[in-house]
Image (spheres, helix red, strand yellow):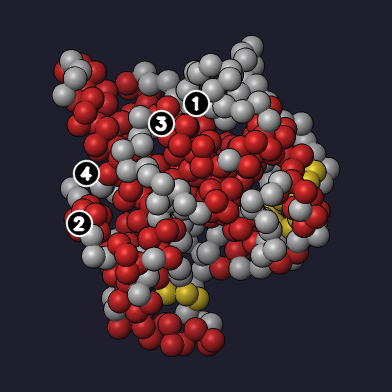
């Protein structure tokens, strides 16, 4: 596989440049690009994709043929689009540099019997670009639920909550797959919000199914068999981390959460009241990486970030640094980014305001 050199506290902008420009071994193709395309298809400069993040996301998703539900409304939030691209690049960086992350993801993905039995050629970036570029596409629904609830599109979304092809994934804690639908309606009724992670997962599920039906009507049977395998196994492994990444757990011993504990109990969400974190790197590596990167990603945290100008000139972004080893991530200048992670992601004994060990 391809590897970045270990860094000693690189800032996030250096990481963006390094990952974006890194090429696959013996190839002109970039490590983050799953599809072969003309070298001029994407901008040569990473700053340009942050200047026009909507274009980058649209182009990448169109390459994949999974753009059936992508529109200007869903991609209207520029800062969220920048956050998604930042999450994508940082996650690629951690995968390539933190051995425990890469080893556990590779074990779960590439030792999958479905992949080996069908001789599929697949890469981590296939999973990761879909997970990252889709994971916040439901955010516009969360911000403006009143505009969505009146539409037929909402009915289509809720019908897919219990779609028979949305099968459980072994890469996700069972308490997510068993409670996500109840959690969706809890957030809607209690907080008048459409939970953006669940919405985003359903949007991808709908796009994948629509694309699958189109292909099914235009392909020979032997190709459909392979596509059906992907549909039932690999796609579910991609969809579920998106659905589950923003579901909130409550520590049963946290007295400050008594009201929420009571609400969860009354609405049938007792499983989400936990003693210890349920997401671990060995069993749930894709969800683990998404939750980790989504939490430490700086763009959405910088309140004074002017997303309409060059974000690379933002001092807070330039000061945001991380250092990596085979199992550890150390943060510089942004000590508060990992404060709450220990309540929902399992770490080893090393955990402080600046360092986590996976």
**Between disc 1 and disc 2, whose residue precedes?**
1
Q: What residue is rendered at 58% in x and 40% in y?
A: 52
**Between disc 3 and disc 4, whose residue precedes?**
3
- Using a 10 Å C-alpha cutoff, classify the residue at mark 2 as few (fewer than 14 neighbours), some (14 to 19) or many (20 or more): few
Q: Secondary structure at mark 4?
A: loop
Q: Which residue is mark 4?
A: 165
Relative to residue 204, is residue 224 drawn left or right?
Answer: left
Calculate the distance from the C-alpha at mark 3 to the C-alpha at mark 2.
Answer: 24 Å
Q: Secondary structure at mark 3?
A: helix
**The label number, if any, that marks residue 62 in the structure image:** 3
Q: Which residue is mark 2?
A: 152
Calculate the distance from the C-alpha at mark 1 to the C-alpha at mark 2.
Answer: 34 Å
**Label 3 vs label 4, nearer the camera:** 3
**Label 1 vs label 2, nearer the camera:** 2
The quarter in which the N terminus is drawn is top right
Q: What residue is rendered at 47% in x and 23% in y?
A: 35
Q: Nearer the viewer, residue 310 or 271?
A: 310
């Amino acid at each position: 596989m391809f590897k970045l050199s270990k860094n000693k506290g690189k800032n996030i902008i250096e990481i963006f440049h390094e990952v974006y420009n890194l090429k696959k071994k013996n190839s002109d193709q970039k490590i983050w690009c799953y599809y072969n395309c003309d070298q001029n298809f994407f901008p040569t400069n990473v700053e340009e994709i942050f200047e026009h993040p909507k274009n980058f996301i649209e182009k990448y998703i169109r390459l994949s043929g999974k753009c059936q539900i992508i529109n200007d409304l869903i991609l209207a939030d520029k800062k969220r689009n920048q956050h998604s691209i930042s999450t994508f690049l940082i996650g690629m960086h951690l995968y390539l540099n933190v051995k425990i992350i890469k080893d556990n993801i590779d074990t779960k993905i590439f030792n999958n019997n479905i992949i080996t039995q069908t001789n599929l050629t697949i890469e981590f970036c296939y999973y990761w670009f879909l997970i990252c570029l889709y994971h916040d596409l439901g955010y516009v629904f969360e911000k403006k639920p009143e505009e969505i609830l009146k539409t037929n599109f909402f009915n289509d979304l809720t019908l897919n909550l219990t779609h028979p092809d949305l099968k459980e994934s072994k890469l996700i804690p069972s308490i997510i797959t068993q409670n996500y639908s109840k959690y969706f309606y809890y957030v809607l009724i209690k907080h008048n919000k459409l939970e953006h992670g669940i919405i985003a997962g359903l949007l991808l599920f709908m796009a994948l199914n629509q694309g699958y039906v189109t292909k099914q009507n235009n392909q020979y049977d032997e190709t459909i068999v392979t596509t059906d395998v992907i549909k039932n196994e690999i796609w579910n492994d991609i969809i579920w981390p998106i659905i589950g990444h923003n579901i909130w757990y409550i520590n049963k011993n946290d007295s400050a959460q008594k009201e929420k504990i009571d609400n969860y109990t009354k609405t049938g969400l007792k499983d989400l009241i936990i003693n210890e974190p349920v997401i671990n790197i060995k069993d749930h590596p894709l969800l683990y990486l998404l939750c980790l990167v989504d939490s430490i990603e700086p763009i959405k945290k910088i309140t004074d970030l002017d997303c309409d100008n060059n974000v690379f000139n933002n001092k807070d972004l330039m000061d945001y640094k991380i250092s990596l080893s085979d199992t550890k991530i150390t943060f510089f200048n942004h000590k508060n980014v990992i404060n709450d992670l220990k309540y929902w992601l399992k770490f080893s004994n090393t955990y402080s305001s600046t360092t986590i060990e996976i």
